[in-house]
Image (spheres, grey):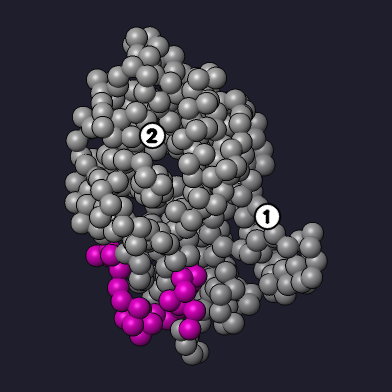
Amino acid sequence: MTDIAIIGGCGHVGLPLGLAFAEVGKQVAAVDIDGPKVEATNAGEMPFSDRGADDLLTKVLKDGTFIATTDPAIVRESEVIVTVIGTPVDEHLNPRFDVMQRFVNEIREYLVPNQLLVLRSTLFPGSTARVKQLLDKMGLDVDVAFCPERVAEGVALEEIKGLPQIVAGVDERSQKRAEELFALLTPDIIRLETTGAELAKLFTNAWRYIQFSVANQFYMIANDYGIDFYDVHNAMTFKYPRAKDFPRAGFAAGPCLFKDTMQLSAFHNNNFFLGHSAMLINEGLPNYIVQRARRRFPDLSEKKVAILGMAFKPNSDDPRDSLSFKLRSILQAEAAEVLCVEPNFHDERFVSLDEAMDEADLVILGVPHSQFRELDFGKKPLIDIWNMTNQRMDVI
């Protein structure tokens, strides 16, 4: 008998959660369709970077409380099923509930009475209730709860055990079972009804997305008037508590912030003007950098440009929805050649850091990985909107 089966269990959301439950003694099965990831995980090799996860994976495999598998039949043996499948947006930025409907149709043959189904990823408001309705129509007596993940990639394992857990069951029995489950990880349980919990997740990511857009807009304003944004930023934040959370400029990317902001907009009949403004600013930053670089270097079309960092955020090995790739696409139309460097994952299109630094006429810091912190750029022109170095070409 398996206590918990996590569908999508070898990914960035599912695997840290599975390890956390296995650490407290639950029998956990990580179910995933990616065979190589399953094989690597069972061999004790984390398929991605997450602080503290490597040692814990080795431990729970040795203890026999964790296993990864491609066989969904193990779901039948599990008291709790956790899915990290959420509602994505389509090419028109509308939410796709059909993904959840397809998931229910595919898993129905493995469900048995009295199981608890926990929805873990971002959902369009109302989706939890709709999943329960689908299960009821199929005659499946399964409890359902939405318990959104709120962790930062790379430190997910730490934050699962350190952050309060939002728990929202479709009824009191589902609520109680989900609360007892997550109380194994944290004493801080926050009870909400399902739509409120779905909005809490969307609000959280939209808020971060808007905060980043404010910093990026301020960066553009200062830069356009020849003012060093970081001089202003330092003046605003130095020993001034009301501005201590004001972020720096940089790419606001990844698989969540943009998508969830657009889901919230769709939920509110596309009347989320702050969200749309944030999208225009954040998604427009790569183009802004290139256009300003073209003004600074009228001969940009004759230059080789290096982009250092292709992940979606610092010290990550995840390329999903990285704006460095958008920057690359724009530069390919503007520069003679684009040389991309990423030390945290392999891509045959990329070059080594040494090659990029030798050949590039201009360097753009796409992501401020710690590996780049001590680089000596010499007299090579550098655009560093993150202000990681002291050679950022103050105004571009």
Residue farthest bottom in this picture: 378
Whole-percent x, y for residue 13 in the image: 41, 46
Image check: 390 left or right of 226? Answer: left
Where does residue 313 sit, x and y in percent of width and height?
Answer: 47, 60
The one of 354 and 10 positioned closer to us in this rendering: 10
Dot placed on the residue nearer the N-terminal end, 2 or 1: 2
Would you say the residues marked 2 and 1 are in contact, meaning their CB atoms lie under 8 Å apart? no
Is 100 magenta? The answer is: no
Name the residue tied to disc 2. 82
Which secondary structure, mark 1?
helix
Residue type at mark 1 is Val
Q: Nearer the viewer, residue 15 or 103?
A: 15
Instruction: Specify start and end residues of the magenta stretch as a single range.
Output: 346-374
One can see residue 199 in this view: no
Res. 325 image quadrant? bottom left
Q: Is residue 142 left or right of residue 122?
A: left
Q: At x 34% / y 28%, what residue is drawn?
A: 79
The residue that mark 1 highlights is 214
Q: Is residue 369 above or below residue 354?
A: above
Q: Residue at x 59, y 73 (%)?
A: 387
**Residue ID at (45%, 77%):** 372
Identify the image quadrant of the N terminus: top left
Q: CA distance from mark 2 to mark 1?
A: 36 Å
Q: Is residue 239 visible?
A: yes
Question: Quadrant location of the C terminus?
Answer: bottom right
User: Where on the picture, by quarter, is residue 274?
Assistant: top right
Residue 309 percent coordinates (x, y): 42, 68
